[in-house]
Image (tube, grey):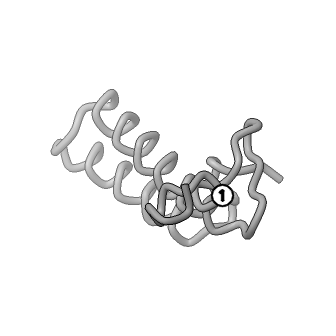
Amino acid sequence: MPAPPFLNPDSPVLRLIVTSAVGALRSGRATAEQAGLHAAVHGWHEGRIQGEGAGPGCDYRGLPKQATRGWLSPDAS
């Protein structure tokens, strides 16, 4: 399975993002480049959110969770 920031292929959020991009392309509201960029950015963003929620000690790409850096609480630093 992919690891964050990549959504699980069965994710309903990913399905919504891709369906929206395909619909925009088919209706002419977006070019292929625009639809692809939209899907990529939103997919990454949602995957990152999923990764942040992975639990204490999330160590994706060698970076500890924000909470362990004190970013969420000024008193923690």
- Residue drawn at (49%, 65%), measured in percent from left and top? 75
Q: Position of residue 32 (x, y in %)?
A: 33, 31
Specify whether residue 34 is in view: yes
Q: Nearer the viewer, residue 65 or 37?
A: 65
Picture quadrant where residue 7 is located: bottom right
Rendered location of residue 36, percent (x, y): 40, 36
Is residue 49 shown left or right of residue 33?
A: right
Query: Which one is nearer the viewer's eye here, 74 or 49?
Result: 74
Residue positioned most to the right:
1
Residue 68, image x, y percentages: 65, 58
User: Where does label 1 land, which residue?
Assistant: 68
Horizontal side of 47 relative to 75 (left or right) equals right
Q: Work out which residue is located at the far left of the displayed protein and give it.
A: 29
Give the tally of numbered discs: 1
Q: Tell me: 12 left or right of 9.
A: left
Q: Amino acid at mark 1?
A: Thr
Q: Position of residue 28 (x, y in %)?
A: 18, 42
Q: Residue visible at 59% across and 61% down?
A: 67
Residue visible at 68% across and 51% down? Answer: 4
Determine whether, in the image, residue 38 is placed left or right of residue 55. Answer: left
Q: Residues within 10 Å of mark 1 (few under 14, many from 20)?
A: some
- Secondary structure beneath dot 1 equals helix
Q: What residue sits 44% from the left and 61% below the top?
A: 74
